[in-house]
Structures are given as C-alpha cells and as structure tokens.
C-alpha cells in the first residue's frame, strides 16, 4: 500500500514540479484570482480539444505525435476558404470543419504511411514531416490561393493579387462558439457549449477504447508482431489512428482559432504541436501512456505557468521583453525536461519493485 | 479414439528441401480424430519443419514450398498462410510466446476474435467500431481455460505471469477456437515445471476425449509414452517408425531415433575442490525476475570445479545467473577473482572473462540473421580481440577468417551441430542446434568462468550426453570453472562436482554430486514458497 503511493508520487513528479513553479510565480505575477481563473478557463476551452487529439496515436503505440500539426493546417485552409465565402458564425465553423475533414484524412493517410516506415521513431519523423507538409501548405496558401483557388476578398489577399495575408481576421466567427450558452459565474465567463463539446469528445474517447478498433490499437501499440500474427492489420490500424488524430486536430484547431479571432496564416500551426505535446507531458503523460486526466491537468498547469511566468519574469527583472523570451524558453524546456524525467522515472519504476525485495531481505 | 474412424489428417509423400538441402523425404502420416500423436526425433530431424508445412508457415512458402499432398477430412489442402490453417481447424502453439504483454489472459485468449456488440456508430462506420462484449469475452475465456483443465488466473496480466502460465494462456487461446480439430504443440513442456507438465499432459488427454487430435513434439520421451496413442519417430527427414505407444518403450524410441542404442554417460570421478581458491563469491544476492525471484543467495564457487544449481522451477535457480548478468534488476555483491563486479552490466562480466549462456536462446542468445561463424566468433572478437590479425603494430586489425572458420568447425564437430556449412545462417538451424551454437559461442570465448543455464533445453536424448561431456571436457582440459543451472537433477548429478539446491529464493544446501536422490529431494522441498 505504502509502496504503491511512493511509486505514484514519483510518476506525479513532473506535474508536481509545475505546481511548485506556479505557486511560486502566481503571487509575483500580481494577477487577481478572478483574472487568473478567467484566463485558465479561456485557455482550457481553447486548447483541450486539440490536446485530446493526441491521445489516440499514443494508444496505438505511435508516441507523442506531431501528425496533429497536419490537421491544424487542414483546418486553417478550410477556415480561410469559409472566411472568403463569408459564411459567418457557428455555421461557418461547421462548414470549415466539414471541409477540413477530407484534407485531414488525406494528410493523415500520407503521414500514417510514412510513419509505418519509421516504426519506433514516430516522434521525430512526424516532427520533420510537419516541416515538409508546412512547405506544401505555404505553396497552397502563398501561390495557389488567388491563382488557382479563387479568393474574392482583398481583405485576406495579399496586395499583389494572390496569396494570403499574414493574418486573416476571423472577426465573423470570433468566440461565436464560446459565447453561445456562455454563463457567468461570479465574474468568470464559462463557455459552456465549448466545454460540452469537449466533454462529448472525452466520452467518445472513453467509448472508443472499448471498441474493437480501440482494442486492436492497444494490441498494436504493445506488440506489433504478436498483433500481426493474430491477424490484425497492423499497418492499417496505425494509419487509422493517425487519421483520427489529424481529423480531431482539425476540429480542435477550428475551436482554437475561433477563440483567438484571427489566423496567423504562416505560423499558427507550427507551434501548436509543440505546445500541445508540452501541455500533455506536464499533465503527467508519457510517451507510451496518456489519459484524459493528463490532458486537463496539463492544460491547467501549463497555461497557468504560461500566464504567470512572463509577468513574474517582468516583475523580477523589470523588463517585459525578458518575460516574452522566458515564455518561449520555458515551453521548449518543458518538453526536454519532461522527456528526461520520464526516462528516469521509467528506470526508477522498474527498480521500485526490486527495492521491495531488498527491504524484505534487510528486515530479516 | 476410434481406430476405425476415417482419418482427420493424411500426409502423403511430403518432401521439403531448403535450397537443395533435403530435410524431409517422403513422409506419410495419418491421424484420426481424437488421436494423440507423439513426434520424436533428433535435433534437426525435421519435426518443426513438418509442422510448419502443415500450418502454412510463411518461411515454407518463402523457401519454395513443399512437395506432396495433405488431406484434411479427405479434402486436399495446401495452406499458404497460418490463417487458412486456423480457419480449417488447425491450431499451433509455438515455442516462442506470441502474447501481448500488457493484456490480461482473457484479452490474449480472444485476441482479434473478441465477441462484439453492434451499435449505431458501427452501422455507419463499419464493424471495427463495434464495442467489445466484455462479459461474453469473460465466459469464453473461462470456458477455454476449463476445457484445458489447468487453473490460470484469467485476469492476470501476461507480463506478471510465470512462463508456464504464459504457455497455458497460448494453449487456452487455441482451445477457444470453436473450429479447432487439430492442435500442434511444438516442445510445449520445455518451459514447464514438472507439475505444470503433468497438468498439460492431463489436458491433452482431455482434448483427445473431446475429439481433438493432438500432435505433440517433445524430447522427454517419458511424456510421449504416458499421453500419446501413437508414436512417430523421425530420423534425418525420414519417418522411420510409427507404432502404437503401447507397443514401444523409451529405449526402443531412442534406438530408432538415433539409429543405435544410447548408453548413459560413463561413471566419472568427482573432483574435490575444497582447498582451491574461491573464484566467484556471491553475497546476499536478490533478483527481481518474474516467476524466478531470488531472495537471499550467498554462494562460493571454487576454481576448477563444476558447480550445479538445481531446484524446482519457480524457486529462483534461473534468477541467479540472470541477476548476476544484469538481465534483471538485482542487488547484493558479486566478487569474481577477488574483484567486485557491478551487477547489471553484462559487458563488464564478459570483460572479466566470465561467460554466460542463457536459457532463453532466442531472446539474448544468437544473432539469428548472421552466419554460424559470426555467431561463434563475434563475442570473442569483440571482447577479447581474438581472431584478429594485427598489422603495423596493431594499428590495423583484420579479421582472421581462417582462424574463425577453424574454431567454428571444431565446435561443429565436437557438438555435432547439424548444418550445411559454417556459413549457414543461425535462424536456419533447428531449435536444438541453435542451443548448441550458444554453447559453442561461450566455449570460443575461453573464459575463466562459464555460467550455463539449462544447457540441454531442447536437445535430444542422444545429444544430451554429448553436450554434457563437452562441458565436462571443457572444464577438465581447459581448467574452466563451470556453474551450471538445470532443472534436471539427473543431468546435474552426471556432470557436476557439487550441487547447490535453491528453494524459495534461498540456497537450501550444497551436496556432493554423488549424494542420493532422496537427500536432494528433501532439500528441494525444504523452503518452497
Ligand atoms: N529456414 C531454413 N532454411 C534452411 N534450412 C532450414 C530452415 N529451417 C530449418 N532448416 C533445416 O531443416 C532441418 C530440420 O529442422 P527442424 O527445425 O525441422 O528440426 P527439428 O526436428 O524441429 O529439431 P529440434 O528438435 O532441434 O527442434 C535442420 O537441419 C535445419 O537446419
Ligand atoms: Mg524444432
């Protein structure tokens, strides 16, 4: 009993480290509790869905996967088109979601096929591949849009007549989803509809684990050879897991961007993968295991730190630029530290059982 | 079994060659429903190959298929993949486990054959989105385990199970297939304790009563006699004998297996090394090896002796070498030749001229895709710079191909490894011959201390004495200290000078090898947990 607690404590060490950082920074940041909670709630609604999209490839043994970046690009293309067609509000978002699906599926299949050739190195392969697809995305957005794909409105076009501007305003959709059914509890705005969608997504994931496909993914994730011998189509199962992830990431990106209110056409997707993975790790997930609980804990901790750390940094140094710098530095550091800590934890967890033996020996 | 019923399986004129090397010649075999056929034969006789042909294994098709006809229920069949064989009612339990480690027994038994429940989503997106019917899974797994007649915990995770239970999980998986009519078991008892082996034999009898035919391969001939209806003996790819079990005996089977009668190893002197210096000192060792936990072992090995480590399976004897070599988490101190060697770093062990042959020949034993030469010489080359020609004062090192071939051929002869040449790839050898290569590899290292674990696992009766003799010769002639772990007491008594018995994770005593079986027996049972 006691032992079990000890092991859990060790597993929780990453989240605990961040809780300590947050506790240390919150008073220094000078934010009122109400403001802080407001911020956290906003970011939870903004990011949770995106992070949830990471869970399924982890289940299939494909690790923390940057394949979601592809889904994010698909969503951006869809949103730009819908924006140009001037379909506003929630219907516009639904349409964008529908348009993003075929693009996400195609990219997901492509990504899955490549990752099937790089078994065991999915994380780094998908990271590099995201760069490659980013190149294609830029061709589409910078040249084809306006030249091949008709874009009517000059507000999103570059002055030269083709290509998309650096930022595309989503004013017509801005927080439309969040404001629908929003409630106000003691000055804190809660975007109820967004949360309901996220809750439904969680239920879907729980349900998915109990399906045949979910079971196959878990089997494939643990031992591909055995799964193949049992007749499971390993390659196909892995591709499906990536496709599900890209499609969900596309939906997640639409939710994210409607909250932001504009698209940073050339950069929005590139950091989103990094931030989502960092948040999930901070929530206590590992490369081969992640739960819904990790997602929410991760969002809260990672973003609390994101909100308070720059201000605390500015307070200590008196320079606001330092704070900005600090913010980027921290998120990259988080991934590195989390990965290292998990490696050590894995080793420690292995020896924990052995320590028991040693103790038993010493007691005699 | 009804001797007059129509045969379930008929094999006619089966021939197989691997690139010109004829391994099966004109095999004719018949099997009736409910019949249990024991398949015996020396290492490399072709038993596994014959079964792979029947089961449609991929390596048969890849190496050019086979000649001859197989009839199932009078219908001609030729399986290209195991799935076709499974669909036709054939099941096979391989020696290597094919289980998902993080799934429990139930999930493994029904892997990819889970009962499902339809739902609205799956109506649209296809059957893979059906949910699993957990309660039905549970019932089916329970039934399969009951059919097997051996009690295993169906909710236990595979990675926490002892080896024997993994084996039973695999068998239960085959039994859970409703269409199963013929079960092939390739050396299933090699990893089992005596008690487990006995329950497996019981469960084979049960299957036979239910009308399932069983082909049972083993090197323990006593098992064949006690459970089989018919015994088929193969020698060099030829089926030399197929007789009812009631009409044969261990001696007769052995004789037709090897073509001569096998005498037991001659009587030999027991060396007393009490005065010799201690070469290996193990102090308060604990090892966390699942199913073979070592709790507190202290042991001194004298230079030049052969020390046996015996005991019932699951009591920890296998944990000792694995812990010392650092293959599992371990603690305590190990002193070799006066130096403390850190646990958990195999390379350091090897540097201290301390060689190790694992009981798990597939896991850590061989480079299966490499040639025999490479397998035998590589560690010696890597660790001790042997078989290297030096030029320019050692600046350039060149592999000495000739020396490598010579040493490999020496051991091929000595251990009678059955192969086409020293350049053959290790994975093309039969199971027993791979085991011999593992030993040759350790011999080539010429270590000061050799730690062998289950050296005769999977080796046929004829070759057992040969392997043990080689081990003893290696000890006596090269002065190499040998520590040998084995579950067969007779084997230890034939080979060793002293035997330590492990029970309940501790050493319960050490006796000279010529002590009586009763003395050893009492000791084995003394601390059992
Ligand atoms: N893939 C292969 N390529 C070439 N030769 C092979 C291959 N597989 C098996 N052989 C050869 O076929 C012969 C028969 O091997 P098989 O595995 O059937 O023996 P076995 O009777 O099962 O022996 P054991 O008791 O040692 O398991 C051996 O000489 C082996 O070298
Ligand atoms: Mg074999």
Image: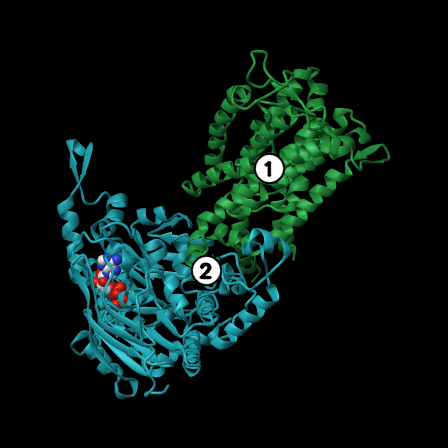
Chain colours: A green, B cyan
The answer to whether B108 appears left or right of A47 in the picture is left
Label 2 C-beta lies within 8 Å of the nearest ligand 2 atom: no
- The residue nearer to you, when weighing B152 against B381, is B152
Q: Nearer the viewer, residue B215 or B123?
A: B123
- Pick the quarter of the image with the C terminus of chain A: bottom right
Q: Which residue is mark 1?
A: A249
Question: As drawn, is B212 to the left or to the right of A11?
Answer: left
Q: Which quadrant of the structure image shows residue B92? A: bottom left
Give the side of residue A222 with respect to residue A81, left or right: left
- What residue sits 26% from the left and 62% below the top? B430
Residue B188, placed above or below residue A268: below
> Of A137 and B525, which appears nearest the observer?
A137
Q: Is residue B268 visible?
A: no
Q: Quadrant of residue A190?
A: top right
Pinpoint the chain carrying mark 2: B
Identify the subunit bearing mark 1: A
Q: Quadrant of ligand 2?
A: bottom left
Residue B447, position as x, y percentages in the image: 26, 53
The residue that mark 2 highlights is B99
Any atom of ligand 1 within 8 Å of the CB at mark 1? no
Residue A221 in the image: above or below residue A256: below
Q: From the viewer's perspective, is A332 left or right of B37?
A: right
Residue A218 in sight in this render: yes
Q: Residue at x 37, y 61 (%)?
A: B300
Residue at position x 67%, y 46% from top? A202
Relative to B330, say whether B398 is above or below: above
Residue B147 position in % (x across, y down): 49, 77
Q: Residue farthest to the top?
A: A160
Residue that lies at the very extreme toward the right in this rendered image: A186
Q: Give the structural element (helix, strand or loop) at label 2.
A: loop
């Amino acid at each position: 009993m006691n032992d079990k607690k000890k092991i859990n404590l060790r597993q929780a060490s990453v989240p605990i480290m961040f809780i300590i950082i947050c506790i240390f920074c919150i008073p220094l940041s000078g934010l009122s509790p109400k403001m802080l909670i407001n911020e956290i709630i906003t970011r939870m609604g903004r990011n949770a869905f995106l992070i949830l999209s990471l869970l399924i490839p982890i289940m299939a043994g494909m690790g923390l996967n940057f394949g979601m970046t592809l889904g994010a690009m698909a969503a951006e293309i869809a949103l730009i088109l819908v924006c140009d067609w001037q379909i506003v509000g929630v219907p516009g978002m639904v349409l964008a979601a529908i348009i993003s699906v075929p693009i996400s599926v195609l990219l997901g299949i492509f990504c899955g096929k490549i990752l099937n050739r790089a078994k065991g190195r999915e994380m780094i392969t998908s990271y590099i591949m995201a760069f490659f697809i980013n190149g294609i995305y830029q061709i589409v957005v910078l040249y084809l849009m306006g030249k091949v794909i008709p874009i009517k409105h000059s507000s999103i076009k570059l002055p030269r007549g083709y290509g998309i501007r650096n930022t595309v305003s989503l004013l017509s959709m801005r927080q439309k989803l969040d404001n629908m059914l929003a409630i106000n509890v003691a000055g804190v705005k809660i975007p109820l509809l967004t949360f309901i969608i996220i809750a439904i997504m969680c239920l879907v994931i729980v349900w998915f684990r109990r399906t045949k496909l979910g079971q196959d993914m878990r089997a494939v994730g643990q031992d591909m050879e055995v799964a193949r011998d049992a007749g499971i189509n390993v390659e196909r199962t892995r591709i499906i897991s990536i496709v599900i992830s890209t499609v969900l990431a596309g939906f997640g990106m639409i939710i994210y961007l409607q909250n932001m209110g504009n698209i940073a056409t050339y950069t929005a997707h590139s950091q989103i993968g990094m931030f989502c993975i960092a948040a999930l790790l901070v929530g206590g997930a590992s490369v081969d295991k992640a739960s819904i609980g990790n997602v929410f804990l991760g969002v809260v901790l990672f973003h609390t730190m994101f909100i308070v750390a720059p201000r605390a940094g500015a307070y200590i140094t008196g320079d606001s630029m330092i704070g900005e710098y600090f913010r980027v530095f921290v998120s990259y550091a988080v991934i590195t530290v989390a990965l290292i800590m998990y490696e050590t934890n894995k080793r420690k967890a292995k020896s924990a059982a052995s320590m028991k033996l040693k103790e038993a020996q010493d007691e005699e | 079994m009804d001797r007059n019923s129509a045969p379930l399986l008929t094999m006619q004129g089966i021939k197989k060659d691997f690139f010109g090397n004829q391994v099966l010649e004109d095999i004719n075999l018949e099997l009736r429903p409910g019949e249990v056929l024991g398949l015996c034969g020396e290492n490399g006789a072709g038993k596994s190959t014959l079964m792979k042909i029947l089961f449609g294994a991929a390596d048969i098709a890849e190496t050019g298929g086979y000649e001859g006809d197989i009839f199932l229920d009078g219908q001609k069949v030729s399986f290209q993949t195991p799935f076709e064989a499974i669909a036709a009612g054939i099941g096979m339990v391989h020696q290597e486990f094919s289980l998902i480690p993080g799934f429990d027994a139930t999930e493994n038994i029904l892997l990819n054959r889970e009962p499902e429940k339809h739902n609205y989503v799956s109506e649209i997106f296809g059957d893979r989105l059906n949910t699993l019917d957990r309660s039905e899974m549970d019932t089916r797994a329970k039934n399969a385990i009951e059919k097997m007649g051996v009690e295993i915990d169906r909710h236990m995770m595979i990675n926490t199970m002892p080896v024997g239970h993994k084996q039973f999980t695999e068998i239960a998986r085959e039994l859970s297939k409703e269409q199963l009519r013929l079960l092939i078991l390739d050396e299933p008892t090699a990893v089992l304790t005596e008690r487990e082996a006995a329950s497996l034999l019981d469960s084979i009898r049960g299957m036979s009563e239910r009308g399932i035919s069983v082909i049972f391969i083993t090197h323990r001939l006593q098992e064949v006699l006690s459970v089989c209806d018919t015994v088929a003996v193969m020698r060099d790819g030829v089926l030399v004998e197929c007789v009812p079990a009631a009409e044969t005996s261990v001696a007769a089977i052995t004789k037709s297996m090897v073509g001569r009668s096998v005498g037991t190893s001659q009587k030999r002197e027991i060396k007393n090394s009490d005065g010799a210096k201690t070469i290996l000192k193990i102090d308060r060792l604990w090892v966390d090896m699942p199913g073979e936990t070592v709790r507190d072992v202290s042991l001194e090995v004298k230079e030049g002796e052969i020390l046996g480590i015996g005991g019932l399976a699951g009591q920890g004897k296998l944990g000792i070498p694995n812990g010392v070599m650092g293959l599992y988490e371990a603690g305590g101190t190990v002193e070799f030749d006066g130096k403390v060697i850190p646990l958990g770093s195999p390379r350091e062990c090897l540097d201290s001229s301390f060689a190790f042959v694992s009981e798990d020949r597939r896991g850590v034993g061989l480079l299966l895709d490499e040639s025999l030469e490479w397998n035998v010489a590589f560690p010696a080359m890597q660790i001790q710079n042997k078989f290297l020609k030096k030029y320019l004062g050692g600046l350039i090192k060149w592999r000495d191909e000739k020396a490598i071939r010579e040493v490999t051929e020496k051991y091929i002869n000595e251990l009678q490894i059955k192969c086409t040449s020293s350049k053959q790839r290790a994975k093309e050898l039969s199971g027993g011959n791979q085991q011999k290569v593992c030993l040759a590899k350790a011999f080539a290292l010429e270590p000061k201390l050799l730690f062998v674990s289950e050296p005769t696992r999977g080796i046929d009766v004829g070759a057992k004495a040969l392997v043990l003799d080689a081990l003893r010769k290696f000890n006596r002639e090269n002065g190499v200290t040998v520590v040998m772990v084995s579950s067969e007491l007779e084997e230890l008594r034939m080979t060793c000078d002293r035997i330590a018995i492990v029970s309940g994770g501790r050493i319960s005593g050490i006796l000279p090898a010529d002590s009586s079986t009763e003395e050893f027996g009492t000791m084995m049972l003394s601390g059992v947990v």
